[in-house]
Image (tube, rainbow, N blue to C red):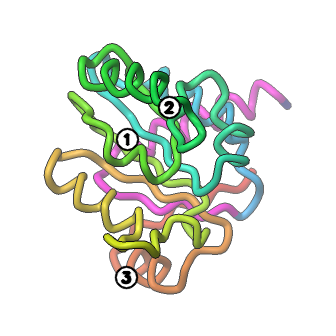
Amino acid sequence: NALTTSEEIRRFAASVFLSKEKFILEKTNLPRQSFYKELLEQLPKGNQMLILFPELFALKKFAGDIPLYHGDLKETEKALLWKSVRDGKICAVAGTRAALFLPFKNLKHIVMDFEHNESYREKRQPAYHAKEIAEKLTQILGASLSIISASPRVESYFQASRNNRIIPWEN
């Protein structure tokens, strides 16, 4: 039933905003576009949200109408988006790991989708993992972090289960 599904998504999205860190374990496929649309609708006015994807393919497939930030943008497009984010004119951005370094004015929520994907790791210097940067941003800015994966990295699953932060998605 589509109505039940949209209501389930609405309730599930609301639960994501209730704590500082959540680990969403996909037991069945999460309807991503509907989920992200619902998160945007529930984002308080004036707040900003960043949705991270490991690769351009997933970014373009699941981000919907959310402005995109990635390495294939022209420099002028990057500059315009950078300025809009800095000025608080954009409430949400979907991007690859480089989007973590955008100058958000009021970043309050980060979603890291497909957390298990190795593309989140930058091997060139300065080497980093996007999850570590996202966690540091949440500490600095007082933002919350939601991690989504169907097959999480062992260390992420262990940490989330130890801290009782796992929310299963299944419908």
Q: Are marks 1 and 2 in contact (CB under 8 Å)?
A: yes
Tell whether position 82 is magenta. no
**Residue, disc 1:** 17
The disc labelled 3 sits on which kind of residue? Arg
Left or right relative to 132: residue 8? right
46 up-or-down from 119: above or below: above
x 73%, y 47%: residue: 57
Earlier sequence position, callout 3 versus callout 2? 2
Q: Position of residue 154 (x, y in %)?
A: 53, 85
The quarter of the displayed image where residue 47 is located: top left
Residue 39 disc label = 2
Mark before the other along the chain sequence, 1 or 2 = 1
Our reading of the magenta stretch's main secondary structure is helix
Q: What range of the chain is rendered magenta? A: 2-26
What kind of element bears circle 3? helix
Q: Is residue 68 left or right of residue 62?
A: left
Marks 1 and 3, how far apart in space? Answer: 20 Å
Category of crowding for the residue at label 3, using alpha-carbon neighbours closer than 10 angstroms: few (below 14), some (14–19), many (at least 20): few
* Mark 1 → mark 2, Cα distance in angstroms: 9 Å
The residue carrying mark 3 is 162
Q: Residue at x 32, y 22 (%)?
A: 44
Quarter of the figure that contains the N terminus: top right
